[in-house]
Amino acid sequence: MFDKHSKWYSIFSLKCPKCHEGDLFETPTFSFRKPFDMPEACPVCEQNYLPEPGFYYGAMFISYGFTAWLCFGFVALFHWGFDWSVEASFALLLAVGSFSFVYIFRLARSSWINLMVKYEPQAARTK
């Protein structure tokens, strides 16, 4: 399911949707130094990562949906599953959320661009 030729690989590895080789972001996944900066194009196949103003607006909805279900599930698990108090469950959620927000942001952008760009395995070989 996560082989190099699948969309899932491109989304979760934060790779170029066209060639699955170039990185979508300039810094490592959990880096807080320039966490939101993307190159203008893929260094391998030259796929444009910023095709138009507001292109990633739809990624906001992906991020919102993912975050809402993650927060609900997280608090429910710790409150009802592990019998923690609501306050402790939310406190842990805030701690985990403060470290994972960059990855969720990147995952939403990766998902959005993968919906719009078709995988072309020969794109990396021709450049």
Image (cartoon, grey):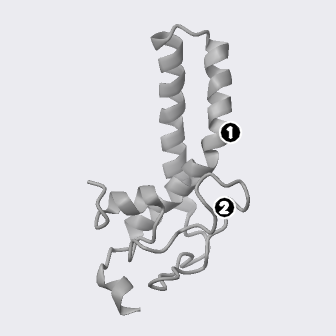
Q: Which residue is mark 1?
A: 98
Q: What's the residue at 53%, 36% (across, down)? A: 68
Secondary element at image label 2? loop
Do the residues under discs 1 and 2 have CB atoms within 8 angstroms? no
Front residue (pair 21, 59): 21
Is residue 82 found left or right of 120 in the rendered image? right
Q: Amino acid at mark 2?
A: Phe
Q: Position of residue 32 (x, y in %)?
A: 71, 54
Q: Secondary structure at mark 1?
A: helix
The residue that mark 2 highlights is 36
Asked whether 55 or 99 is in front, the reply is 99
Using the image, determine if residue 9 lies above or below residue 46. above
Residue beneath the point at 38% across and 83% down: 124
Q: Which residue is at the front of the view, 52 or 105?
A: 105
Quadrant containing the N terminus in the rendered view = bottom left
Q: Residues within 10 Å of mark 2 (few under 14, many from 20)?
A: some
Side (left or right) of 71 relative to 9? right
Q: Position of residue 7 (x, y in %)?
A: 33, 62
Image coordinates of residue 65 in percent, x first then y, are 49, 42
N-terminal of the two: label 1 or label 2?
A: 2
Q: Is residue 44 left or right of residue 52?
A: left
Residue for point 40% across, 63% down: 10
